[in-house]
Amino acid sequence: MATHPLALTLPLDDPARTAAQGIADRLSEGCPVARNDLLAEMTSAFGGSSADGLWSLRDAYDVLELAQVLHLKNATLPADANARLAQLIAMTAALPTQSVRSETQIAFQQFSTPAPIGFLAAKAAAITAHDIVLEPSAGTGLLAVHAHLAGARLLLNDIDAWRTRLLRHAFPEGRLSTHDGELIDDMLDPQLVPSVVLLNPPFSRSQGRARDRHAALRHLRSALLRLAPGGRCAVILPDRIETEDADWLHATAGAHARLHLDLPPDAYAKHGTGQAVQLILLEKDGAGGSVPRQTCTTLGAALAAIDAMATPCAPQPQPISRPSGLFRGLTRRTRPVCSRAAVTLPTTRAVAYHRLDAPAPAGEPQGIYLPYRPSRLLIADAREHPSAL
C-alpha cells in the first residue's frame, strides 16, 4: 500500500476522536482520569455503552492512549529533561491501569510504549528538527509524539486498521503506511529514508505465523536496513534478548550499540504487562566496540545514563591518494586494446504472469531471515530455486 499524507482522510466526527479529546481536555486541566471517567467519555461519544456493542473496553484504553498524544502535542512541557520526565510519570500514574486485552492485541502484541519510556527512547536517539523519524510499529503514537515534539518529520507505519485510524487523528501532518513492520524495508517507498528509527516491535508474534521468538529481531533487521548510514535506532526489546547471541549479531550487522539499559521491571505496569524490557541505542555504521549493560532501578536513573552517554565522534574525511612525486616524470605509454569476440545473446520470449493485489504470504522463517519469494507476481510454469534464498 502506498504511503500517503493523512490530512485528506480524517473523518471529523469520529467518536473515537471525540472521546479522546474529552480525556485530553481533562489532562490539560490537571485532572486525574479514573476508569469511570474514561467509560463515560466513550459512552457519550459513541452514543451508547460497551454493552450495546458500540465499543469495547480495549477500544477505550486505546482511545486513552490517543488522548495522551493529543494532550502532549498541545501541552507546555518543561524544557528540563528531568522535570519533563517527572511530569510524564505523574500523568501516567493518574490514568487507569489497562486491565483488558483483546484477541487482536494478543495476535499483534500491541503493547504501546508508556509516555515516560517513549520520552527516554527519543532522548537517547537525540532527535532534532532536522531528522526524519520512522516508527515501523507506531500503534497509537505514544512513542512518535516525542519525535513530533522535537520538530522531526514523521514516517509512521502500523498494520492494524483500528490503530491506523487513531494515528490519523494523532498526526494529520505525518505520513502513514500500513505494511507489516517485519517487511518495512521491502515495502516502504524507496525514497523515504529515515535518519532515526524508534522501534517497539512485537516481541514474539509474526503476521501469519503466530508465536515466533525471532519476530522482534526481524522487525529490527528490516528497520536497520532502511535507516540511513550514520542514523540512530532506539529499540525497546524484551530482557531475554542477549546482545552476544548469533541472532542478535545477524540482526544488527552494520550497526553498533552505543547504549544498553535494563529498565525498571514495572516500566509497563500501567499498560497491563509485567514484561521486563531493555532500551538499546544503535548507530548504523558507527564506531565498533561493546557497551556495558546497565541496570536502571528507576526511570530517572535511565535518564541519567542517557545524559552521561558519550557524544558520537563525527566521521573524519579520508585523504585522497595522489601519485607520489617520484613517478611524475615517467612517460605514460598507451597499450593497444585486444579485440573481443562478439557475444551472442540467447533468444528471449514473453513470460506469462499474474499480478497479485495483495502481497503473497511469507514462507516459514529460517532463524531471523524470511525466505525470498516474489511478493506481487505469479509467473506461469516457474520452477522453485534449488536452494533457499
Image (cartoon, grey):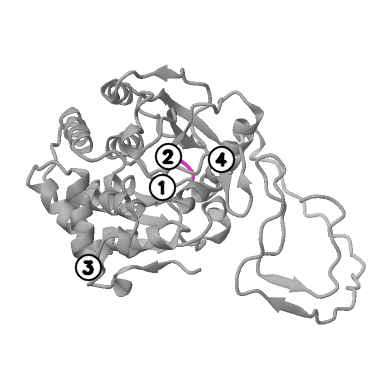
- Vertically, is 137 above or below 356? above
Q: Which mark is residue 47?
A: 3
Any magenta on residue 220?
A: no
Residue with the mark numbered 2: 232
Amino acid type at image mark 3: Gly
In the rendered view, does 304 fall on the left or right side of 200? left
Q: Nearer the viewer, residue 242 or 284?
A: 242
Quote the CA–CA distance across marks 4 and 2: 24 Å
Tell me which amino acid carries mark 2.
Answer: Arg
Q: How many marks?
A: 4
Q: Earlier in the sequence, mark 2 or mark 1?
A: 1
Which residue is under mark 4? 204
Q: CA distance from mark 3 to mark 1?
A: 43 Å
- Of marks 1 and 4, the one in the foreground: 4
Give the labeled residue for mark 1.
195
Residue 352 visible to an observer of this rendering: yes
Sooner in the amino-acid sequence: mark 1 or mark 4 = 1
| Nearer to the camera, 283 or 94 | 94
Q: Look at label 4 and name its amino acid.
A: Ser
Residue segment shown in magenta: 229-234
Q: Amino acid at mark 1?
A: Ser
